[in-house]
Amino acid sequence: MEINRQIIAQHVDLPVMKLVGNVADELHRECYVVGGYVRDIFLKRPCNDLDFVTVGSGIEVARAVANRLGRRAHLAVFRTFGTAQVKTRQWELEFVGARRESYHRESRNPIVEDGTLDDDQKRRDFTINAMAICLNKERYGELLDPFDGIGDMERRIIRTPLDPDITFSDDPLRMMRAVRFATQLGFDIYPETFEAIRRNAKRIHIITRERIAEELMKIMRSPQPSRGWKLLDQCGLLPLIFPELAALKGVETVNGRGHKDNFMHTLQVLDNVAAASDDVWLRWAALLHDVGKARTKRWDPQMGWTFHNHNFVGEKMVPKIFAKMRLPLNDHMKYVKKLVGLHMRPIALVEDEVTDSAVRRLLFDAGDDIDDLMTLCKADITSKNQNKVQRFRENFDLVKQKLVDIEEKDRVRNFQPPIDGEEIMTTFGLEPSRPVGYIKDAIKDAILDGVITNDYASAYRLMLDKAAELGIPHAHDGHLCHTTMSTPLGTLMIAASDRGIAFIGWDKGSVEKIAQKLKLQQVEMVTPLLSQCIKQLGEYFDGTRREFSLPLHVTGTDYQLKAWNELQKIPYGETISYGEQATRLGNPKGARAVAQANHNNPVSIVVPCHRVINADGSLGGYASGTDIKRQLLSLEKR
């Protein structure tokens, strides 16, 4: 690789570099920028972390630099390690004195002595990280590359400056770093260096799991993470740091029937996901999606090799793997666990007939992670048979469209059933118990199976039916419970029986009439059903609700019931004439009968008789007065 002095000059011709160089000259210190920043100049990668080596005290230089930068700089000193850090809004500056190191066999923590720049470059992990650029005025911008790091970048290899056996035995984490750099940069590991990793692989046991996890996370964020896992396998580190993944390797054959290599399949899925998403936790889900296959592999003479329930076994393995590898046991782990457990569901839909019920349940279980799950599952379609892959992908696209259609229609992603356990207990006067769970699950299952729609009225009616099956009476059986609510149009009276809303209106005396008509005892109290009614009416008056979903308990003649049912079909904000309503009921000349039926409607607003007016556009009558009718229509047109 040709050394372009102009490029070096551009990268060191920075105010912060010149400031550090000037401070070093004033202190009569040799000072160099080293490591990743120098490497990335030639790799043309951005780098905001600057590492400086001084011959002498790095802490002393750091203090002087921080003083020169003033209030915009924060200084942190780590005396134990002989290092210091200066942070500004743009840069992180690390300072250390040049040193030489020696190691005890059972620790990667070195014995440190003062040294020269040459000593410091020799202790670096790889040649590409052992280059330095001088910042002293007399030699400003001079590159020092004693181990041909430039040449190794040109050859695209990872190589140690000195004997790799000593390098890796002294600090075994460097083995992980070699794999990580090779993965990130798309480099090869020099054969002699790679063989040394194999020879020293067992030394990895002295490295903390946290440091290993840091390197694995960097591998997983790389453009092609499978490269890192293959290298870890080939050098012998994989079974030592991740035996569950290593267990997926290999193909077993019985009677001429084998299975695919689940390790290689997993890495293909990982790369497929990496090509589609930068989300590192989705990538972890891809890596772990088949981790349960080693434990579930069975030979069946009729079916061949099977991996029944490997997704559920893998799901249970995820928390233990994360804990052992010191990966976070927070929502990230739960996300990976969830996707591992669900990853077979969309595939099953591709293979089987896609029912609305199955799609609803998948949407419910996956929630906001449904798109990531579908990305994982599409990545999981791998085969050497391209016709098979094409057929699966076409079917998979049908499933994706079905998900969109069902979600738009039924809104089941992340849905909570309209009625929860607390309401069930209050409605029937129950303590937490099995019947409560039974009724709650029955409502959820009925919605997911498409037996009922996802709304309060349907859920309430099913709740009553399931309670009746169990012989559980309503807590307010025989009562007409009533309350009031304030509205922009005055105080509204609301009453409900155990079956549903029986009255909504402004006439307080009507509550007593309804109680007599239904032969119920009046009780002034707020039940869960009345609370729901108040909530929906409040939303209506706020302009955020256009349709109601409330169970009704109204009685009347067959004609009245038909008329009131027809009222509920009139869209929000629209009106029809009495004659049009009569025509819809099959009697164009029955406008007077319609008007009388509407006048007797006991459930105002929810059964919107205010939306029926005279043919000439005048309001016509209304049980609560034409002023109330006018205000309701005005409210709906705002």
Image (spheres, grey):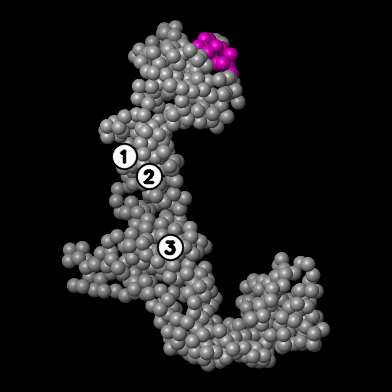
Measuring 42% from the left and 55% from the top, which residue is drawn there?
374
Vertical side of 467 occupied by 230: above or below: below
Residue placed most toward the observer, 528 or 196? 528
Residue, disc 2? 360
Q: Secondary structure at mark 1?
A: helix
User: What is the crowding at mark 1: few (fewer than 14 residues within 10 Å), some, or many (at least 20)?
Assistant: some
Residue, disc 3? 285
Q: Nearer the viewer, mark 1 or mark 2?
A: 1
Res 521 visible: yes
Q: Position of residue 505 (x, y in %)?
A: 50, 18
Residue placed most toward the observer, 512 or 22? 512
Q: Secondary structure at mark 2?
A: helix
Mark 3 residue type: Ala
Q: Is residue 628 magenta?
A: yes
Q: Which mark is residue 636?
A: none
Residue, disc 1? 435
Vertical side of 111 occupied by 256: above or below: above
Where's the N terminus, which quadrant? bottom right
Q: Position of residue 292 (x, y in %)?
A: 33, 65
In this rendering, position of residue 144 left or right of residue 272: right
In this rendering, position of residue 122 left or right of residue 9: left
Residue placed most toward the observer, 611 or 499? 499
Q: In which image quadrant can residue 254 be found? A: bottom left
Q: Position of residue 321 (x, y in %)?
A: 41, 68
User: What is the crowding at mark 3: few (fewer than 14 residues within 10 Å), some, or many (at least 20)?
Assistant: many
Q: Earlier in the sequence, mark 1 or mark 2?
A: 2
Q: Which residues are magenta?
A: 620-632
Q: Earlier in the sequence, mark 1 or mark 3?
A: 3
Where's the C terminus, which quadrant? top right
